[in-house]
Amino acid sequence: MGTSLGVKRRRDIALTLVGALVALVGLVLTGGGAWLAIVGGSWYYLLAGIGMLLAGGLLIMQRRAGVLLYAVVFIGSLLWAAWESGLDYWRWIPRMDVVLILGILVALVAWRTVNGPSRRAAFSTAGGLVLVLAGAGALAFLPHNFSHPGDVPGPQSASLATDTGNAQPADQPADGDWTAYGRDNAATRYTSLNQITPDNVDQLQRAWTYRTGDLLDHRWGAETTPLKVGDSVYLCTSRNILISLDAATGKERWRHDPQVSKDAIPYTAACRGVTYYEVPDNASTQPEDSDGGSDTAGNGAVADTSSSSTAQCQTRIFSGTLDGRIIAVDAETGKPCTDFGDNGQVDIKQNMGETPPGYVSINSTPVIVDNVLVTGHQVLDGQRRYPPSGVIKGYNAVTGELEWAWDAGRPDRSEPLSGDETYVRGSPNMWTTAVGDNKLGLVYLPMANSAADYWSSSRTPAENEWASSLVALDVTTGLPKWKFQTAHKDVWDYDPGSQPTLIDFPTDNGKVPAVVMPTKQGGIYVFDRRNGELLGGGAEERPVPQGGVEPEQRTATQPYSLYHTLQQPELTSRDMWGMSPFDQMFCRIQFQKASYKGMYTPPTADRHWVEYTGYNGGSDWGSIAIDPNRGVLIANYNDMPNYNILVPREQANEYGWKPREEQQSDDGGAEGAGAPQANTPYAVDVNAGWRVPFTGLLCKEPPYGHIRAVDVASGKTLWDRPLGTARANGPFGIRSGLPINIGTPNNGGSAVTAGGLIFIAAATDDLIRAIDIESGKTLWSAPLPAGGQANPLVYKANGREYLMIVATGHHFMQTPSGDYVITYALPE
C-alpha cells in the first residue's frame, strides 16, 4: 500500500513539474507572441503559447487532457514549421527544438500515469521523439546550403592573365614569389605553383612558426599578407614594425621599428602589407631642376644622377603607418632609404589641417605605378562631418617628392597645396588597396563615402559625385580618366572595400583589358579598364525605397550589376533565428518593429532600420581571387544584416557620445556603435552583429558567411557553400568545439593555385583550410593559435612549396589575438 502511494505521489509530482514547465514556456510565448502579433508578425507564438498555458495548467491539475492538448499544440507547431521552413534545416531548429523536448517530457509522464495500450503508445511516442531529436542533432553535421548549379570549366584555351607591363617584379612575378599584396600587380591572388594538389594536401604540416612580438590588448587585427621575393619574406606588424625573414626557415634577418604610438591606432591596428620596389637604372634622387620644377614629368623617370644612397636602396620596402607616414627601407638591410623624403619617410598629413591621433592612418598597401607611389588612407569613421581630407597623394618612389594630390572634394585639380592651404575636410578617402597598370599608367582607386557615413545633407556636389566609386586616375597628371559610382549618396557605409583585380576579359570581340570590382552590396562589376565601359552584361539603375530622415537626399535609383551578384534574397521575418523559439521570437519582434525595404532602406531616427547587406557584407578588404587559366573567380563574402538607428544630437550628448579626441577612454565597441557624427543632426548606433542579448547568437539564420566559385566568362555561379564551422562559435560566448559547417562571419580573402586549391582562413572558427576549386569541398584544415583574419600566400623556397598565414586574430570578429606567422608544407 505504501509503495503504491509513493509511486502515485512521484507520478503526481512529475505531472506537476512537467506541467509547470509547459505552462512557463507557454507564458513566455503568450507574452512575446502577443507583442509580435501587435507589431504585425506571426500569430503562431501567441496561439502556441495559449495552448501550452492551458495544457500546462491541466497537467498541474493532474488532468490527462493536458497531454492531448499538448499533442494538438505539437502537431500544429509541426505543420507551421513545415509551412515556414520547407527543407531549410536551420529554420527548423528554433521552431521545434523546445516543442520537441517538451513533447518528450509530456510523453514520458503520460507513460508513467497510464496503463494498457495507452501506456505502450505513450512509451512509443516518447521513444520516437527521442530518436527524432537525436536525428535532428545528427543532421547538423551534414552539409547544408551547398549549391552546385554549374560545372567548373577546364583550363581556358587562352589564359585570362593580363599585361600590366614589365616595370616591376610584381608585373611578372617569378613562379615561386608573391611580390605584391595580391601576389602580382594585377591582384589575382593566383600562383602557378602546383606541388601541393588535392591528392596530397591532406599531408600538409607545419614547417615553421615565427612570432613578431607585437601583441595588443585591444583593437588587434593586423590583417597582414606578407610578400615573398627571392629568398626573403617581408611583412609588417600591427604597429608597422617591418620585418624580413628567411623564406625557407623563418629566421629573422632584420627589423625596423618606425615607433608608432599606441594612441595612433584607429579602429583597428591593421597593416595589410608592404610594397616591394626596384629602383629603375635611370632613376634620380634629385627631385627638382635649378628652376624648382620637377624633372620627373610626373612619373619619376629622369636622367641618371643616382646617389650612393639610392645604390644602397636599389630594392626598397615601402609601408604606410597608422600615424600617417610612408616609410622606405632597404630591402636588404632594413635601414632607412635616406634619400627618400625626410631621411626615409614622408608625412602624408601635410596640408590636412588638424589631424588628431588615429584620424589619418595608412593600413593598406601603397601602390606604385610608373614609379609614382600612390597612397590613400583611412579617415576615422563616425566621428565628425569634417574630419581630415581623404586626399590621394602620389610621390616619386625614389625621392619622396610629392608630385600630385587628388582630392575628390576638388576633383578637377591635382597640384599639391602649400603654405597654410588645406585639402577639403571630410572628402571621400580610399582606405583600402588600389591596383595599378604600369602599361596604361593608370591606378584604380576604390573610393569611400564622405563623412559622416550615415548623413548626407551637408555633402557638396563634388563629394556626391565621386564618393563610393571606382576611379581610374592617370599617374602622370594625378587627374581622373573615368569613374563608376557603386552607390549614390551613400548613407549605408557601402564604400567599396575590395582591391580590384585586373584580367583580360573574354568578349564576343576578343579579350579586353579589364578591371573586376566587387562591392559590399555583393555586386561584381567588370569594366574595360582603359575607358570604364561596362562589360559582362553591364549594370542597370533600379528604383529604390524613399523616405527616412533625409527624403530629399535619397536618389530614385541605385546601380545593380547584371554580371554577377553575391547578394542573397531580401530578408523576411522567417529568416529571423535563434537557438530556441524565445530568441527567435525576440528577433522577429525587432524585425517587425524596424524599417526594412530592401538593401537601400533609408536611415531612420524614429525606429531602427535593418541594413542588409550590412557594412561588412558582400566582399570587403580580403577581395577576390581569380584563376586565369581555369577562368574561375573565387569570392568569400558575408551575409549578415545590421540593426541601426540614428540618434538625435541632444540624446547622443546625454549618452556621452563624443568624438574620440574628446573622450577619456577609447576602448570602444563595434565600429559605428555609438558613433557621434559631430556637426550633423544625428549620431548613429550600428548593431554590426545583430544579436540576441541573452544567448549572443545572431538574429539572422545561418549561414553568415559563404565562399563561391564563379565562371569568369559567363558570370554564372559554379558552386557556393558556407564558410566556417561552429567549433569556436556557440551560444553564451561558449566555444562549442563542434565542427558544424554553419557558415560564420569572415574577413580576409583567399589564394588560388595551379594545383587546383583554394587556401583560406578568414572565418571565425580559427581554421585555415584547403578547398578543392572543382567541387568546393574542404580537403584539409588546421587549427590556428589565433584568428586568421588575413589573406594567405603561397610561395616556393629551396624547391619546397609553402602556405603562409599571419594569425593575429581580430577584435571585431572576436577571435583570439596573437602574433603568429605560420607556414605549412608537405613533408620533406
Image: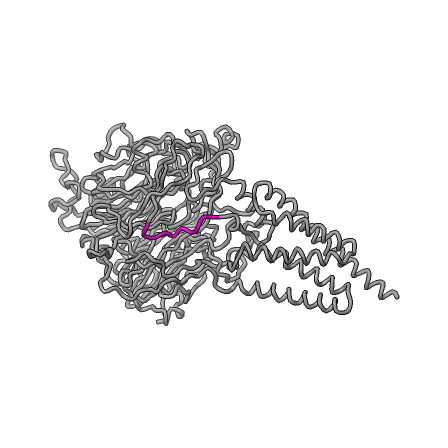
Question: Is residue 344 visible from the viewing direction of this image?
Answer: no
In the image, 163: left or right of 42? left
Residue shown at the point (43%, 45%) measured from the top left: 614
Q: Quadrant of the N terminus?
A: bottom right
In the image, 156: left or right of 114? left
Q: Could you say which is closer to the camera, residue 505 or residue 450?
A: 505
Residue 182 in percent (x, y) is at 30, 54
User: Was residue 489 drawn as part of the magenta stretch in this picture?
Assistant: no
Residue shown at the point (71%, 65%) measured from the top left: 122
User: Was residue 564 drawn as part of the magenta stretch in this picture?
Assistant: yes
Residue 190 placement: quadrant: bottom left
Residue 272 in percent (x, y) is at 35, 50
Name the main secondary structure of what is drawn in magenta.
Answer: loop
Residue 632 in percent (x, y) is at 31, 60
Instruction: Write the start and end of the magenta stretch as one range.
Output: 562-571
- When the figure is inspected, residue 503 is found, relative to residue 297, above or below; the finding is below
